[in-house]
Amino acid sequence: MKVSYQWLNEYLPLEKNQIEPSALAEKLALTSVDINEVYSPSDGLSNIVVGQIESVTPHPDSDHLNLCQVKISEGAVVQIVCGAPNVSQAAGKKVIVALAGAKLKDGTKIKRGKIRGEESNGMLCALQEIGFSDKIAPKAYEEGIWFLPDDAKVGDAVFGYLGMDDTIIDTDLTPNRGDMLSMYGNVNDLSAIYDLPNNFVSHDVKENGTQKAADMLKITIPDPQIAPAYKARVIKNVKLGESPMWLQIRLWNAGIRPINNVVDVTNYILLKYGQPMHSYDYDRLPAHELSVRHAHEGEKFVTLDEAEQTLQKEDIVITSNDEPVCLAGTMGGLNTAVSDQTQNVVLEAAIFDSVMVRKQARRLDLHSESSMRFERGVNPETVETALNEAAYWLQQLAGGEVEQGIVTVSEAPSKSTPITMSLTKINAVLGTDLKLAQVENIFDRLKFAYTQSDDDTLVVSVPARRWDISIAADLNEEIARLYGFNNIPSTLPTMTRTLGGLNERQKFLKATRESLQSMGLNQAISYSLMNEEQAQQFTIEPAVKPMQLDYPMSSDHTTARESIISGLLVDVAYNTARQVEDIALYEQGRVFIPKGGERPEEQEHVAGAMAGSLLADSWNLKRRPVDFYQIKGIVERYLHNMAIAGTIEYVADSTRPEMHPGRTANILLNGKLIGFVGQVHPQMAKDLKIPATYVFELNVEALLAADKLPKQYRHISKYPAVTRDIALLIDEDVTNEEIVDLIYQKGGQYLKDVQLFDVYTGAKLPSGKKSLAYTLTYQADDTTLTEDQVNEAFARVEKHLQNVLNAEIR
């Protein structure tokens, strides 16, 4: 909420006690709510004064410009060229003048110059040019300059006449402090914080009409739960027009556009009391009766913004003759809106079910100042007070006749909440040594009534305006914040001394991150929620119906993910769009696998995505695009680093529609599927606008449950190694894995390593054959190998390859 310091100062002696806006904002931040910003509307502006237009003549060389003779001080008249459409009728009007040398909100500096040959010594300004946003500038002046009040003094700075000399404290509320969405709530809180007298003023209305409101308007609510409080008044013979300047200033400094005196009064009451109100044109109601009910499924309704809404049965509507005239707590209807022809008005003040208002406002994307307050709660103590003050101002500003009585259909009881407090417990919880008199003083400042049952116990009655307080812990927080968090002594917590450390699961997850980062991948964190289509893509096991949220934050985050890769590809697309060519990301996190119960099974997964090149160009190494074998190698090294025991296999797979059918492999551990690795399907990559991208995903839960290889020191031999090369002519369907396994089986105890260094297929080989060449490395740990030892072991390998795989030694 944008809180006006000058408005606060009317109710609290802030200036008298030398409490500056910045200090006030800091105090609020330390005790009540967060602060977004503290600013003055005049910040960044200079040399902008009140001027009076003495004459207006057409520009001799333009059909839309005018020459204005403007008085800027006693005895000083300057010529200013202006093209505003309303300037031609502005003779005698007081206007906003940016003199030569002035600075505007956007940083523009005004200079003397000539416009089409005519001298111009400044600029006549619209509100938008001095910092007002299009959302709050009155519509009547959208395309023209602003006319100041007749009592504005020529030559004065304009800021005081427009409320721009005020300081605005923009507060950011937590959901529980809905009471701070009003001046009433802010004044009560600051009065308690600073222990200042509270001079908040309400205006009661004197009914000057001759008819009974109950005879003019009938209201029914079949289900009182959807509208715990509903009150209305009838005001006749109102005269619509512009609101006085003080009221317009109140509104636009709070970020609300002034409309007319009737609508502005309801918005003013909303700001003052936090009580949303709505005004109906009494004569445009389909019948002189109102009813609050749930909408019919598919019912149509045109809101004030001229948009047709399709309603659901959970929505709340206010009807007249069973026709919707307002979406309760959210937005009024176009057909019964107050207009220039309005003479008689129905004023409504109510409390609607906060959950239902939130759901309908969110679903229809109709968030408003009113819905925001209904969602967080409305003070039942001030519903009638706000209604009466609104009627008072319609009397004062619109000449309205307030008919006799209030039509009350439901009335939320203003109950206080009794809470028993123990001084001993308060001090134990807060770590303080407060006396009972100090605690009582805090409750006096808060205006919380209390009774003392003994020397240690108070029974506190919390007023309805503080609906966020319901238990003793809430009152402990009130005591702490008013006593001052800085005054609470700093002490170390008393606890049992235990040896800290990570458990096995935490160690494994930490090692996972370290292993992947050591291989050049950067950690990413993506949303656990996505749309339904993304949530079911790239699953390790076949996808099932995912878990969906009943009330998601947005249409892009409706479903719990079953795979991490979808989120990583969004990150790849984000980087690609920003000209990042080399991308290597990994993410470790939870996925949610439905198992038929109410809650899905949460599994820890790790996934990676790579595009471009993992290594940059250097003098001795050329840049090489990532390929299947590189990302498969990363997975192999990761599984090796994690000491996974058992047989790991990579089996070609073409069943996943999101993956390239010829460059994808399932990863099996002891025959059980634990993940996959491969290239994203080119069509999907094209749809996502990303280059060729390779991904992997592993079920970490399966890895955690797997047997681990013992970690022990391995002696590094100091004796020389001996190598032998072997080239084989072999059938095309024999895999490298089969050959390497056979070599290790017969290679003997001294065989340390087998490396494939050449593959050849071509016309010079027999049909169905390929040539593979390997280097075998032999080394002993305790002696130097002899030629005979190596030759004997190598001969066994050759014989085994010939007999088992029908290989031809070349």
Image (cartoon, helix red, strand yellow):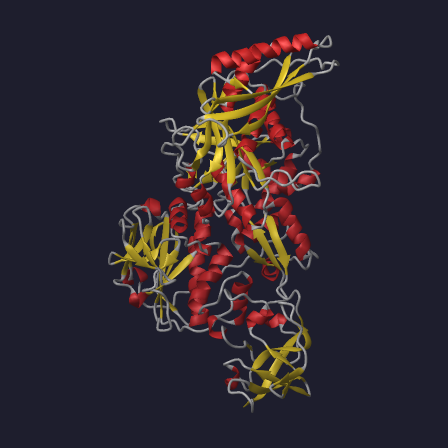
Q: Nearer the viewer, residue 783 or 321?
A: 783
Quarter of the rendering occupied by the C terminus: top right
Q: Is residue 636 above or below residue 140?
A: above
Relative placement, left or right, of 50 versus 231 is right
Q: Position of residue 668 (x, y in %)?
A: 47, 22
Can the viewer see residue 97 in this picture? yes
Q: Quadrant of residue 539?
A: top left
Q: Is residue 3 above or below residue 484?
A: below
Q: Is residue 241 above or below residue 514?
A: below
Q: Position of residue 195 (x, y in %)?
A: 64, 49
Q: Position of residue 114 (x, y in %)?
A: 64, 85
Q: Nearer the viewer, residue 448 or 120?
A: 120
Q: Residue furthest toward the right? A: 718
Can the viewer see residue 424 in this picture? no
Relative placement, left or right, of 618 versus 188 is right
Quarter of the rendering occupied by the N terminus: bottom right
Q: Quadrant of residue 147?
A: bottom right
Q: Residue at x 45, y 64 (%)?
A: 265
Q: Residue at x 75, y 14 (%)?
A: 718
| Callout count | 0
Q: Nearer the viewer, residue 796 or 11?
A: 796
Q: Position of residue 699 (x, y in %)?
A: 49, 26
